[in-house]
Amino acid sequence: MMSTVAMLVTVSVLVLVVPGLLIGFVGGLRGWLLAAAAPLVSYGVIGIAGPLLPAIGIVWSPLALVGSTLLVALLVGTAGTALGRWLPPAAAERITEEPRLRWSLRHHIAVAATVAVSIGYGVFAMGRSSRWFTAVPQWWDAIFHQNAIRFIADSGNSSPSALRMLDRPGAVHYFYPNAYHVLDATVMRLGDWSVPQVANVGNSLIVGSFALAMVALVRQFSGRPALAAATGLLCCAFTSFPFDVLVWGPLFPFTAGAALVPASLALLSRTLNDPGQGTVAVTAVALVGLAALHPSVAIAAAIGGVAMFAQRWVTARRIPIGDLTRLGALALLAAVSV
């Protein structure tokens, strides 16, 4: 039993992070931000390819995810090169920033240890509460989400409109964000696991994604190692999020998206401040992933982004033209990706 769970956890982690790690690396991300953004960028690949592949007659499968990842990585690299010639370097904006504190190897190890605790506790808590990933909450949303995972795994139809078969078969126009379900369906296709096992293990990783995202946000905004470590540890210490919303509702895609909002804000900050223009393309893919998980989460992230921009511009006492061009490029790339 435990060996089966360990294998499922391993496969779920690989499917969640490897596509995003590859694309983020091509786009110039490194370190904590690369690790935190990886799940969001992976969902972005699904958000781009999921609706497109059925339209051209391609069935969704693990191989389709691999191919889509390589194609998006190529596009990100190409877009980064093109934007590097068009957009002005961020350093030219001369906006005074608080210098990022230097973390020693000891600091990185300590912070990583707290994140590991959150990841481990998330897996343990979800396993313990679901009879080691075999039981599901007995509420409507849980049944719908797991039926959606099974439907996509069996049919290979990754279009968001296809889920009308489970909800409103007679609907002519229907849309339901399905990146969460497509990723879990991909895991199902890689092993002999039940839908409850795949969904519960996937949900158990939300705690770790949240911890990584919060640490990356603290790191991006020049936070001290002690603050980052405390943040990573506290991410698993509250029942209100993410545990309650995984039981009451249950709001599986919403919770997965909300956990990644801090990573999206850290990416937006890097897009404004880092001279590497590949970050713009990676951030565009990540924002598509946020919307593909749950549009309301993308709106919440946008509100946080507006506050971040306002603070930056008020501090500078002007709106730098470079910021506007980078944001325009970001919006254009995200719109084209969708």
Image: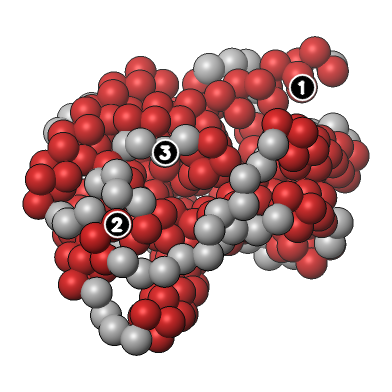
> What is the distance, in whole Å, between disc 3 and disc 1 at their CAs?
31 Å
Q: Give the residue number, with chain letter if any, for mark 3.
A: 29
**Picture residue at 29% right of the left edge, 84% below the top:** 318
User: Which mark, residue 91?
Assistant: 2
Report x, y in % for residue 38: 49, 38
Q: In the rendering, at what x and y percent does residue 260 appear? A: 55, 54
Residue to which mark 1 is pinned: 5
Position of residue 104 relative to residue 325, above or below, is: above
Residue placed most toward the observer, 290 or 78: 78
The amino acid type found where label 3 is placed reads Leu
The answer to whether residue 267 is seen in the rendering is yes
Q: Residue at x 41, y 21 (%)?
A: 62
Question: Hey, what amino acid is under mark 2?
Answer: Ala
Instruction: For mark 3, give the secondary structure.
Output: loop
**Of the two numbered discs 3 and 1 in the rendering, the one whose residue sits closer to the viewer:** 3
x 74%, y 39%: residue: 107
Q: Amino acid at mark 1?
A: Val
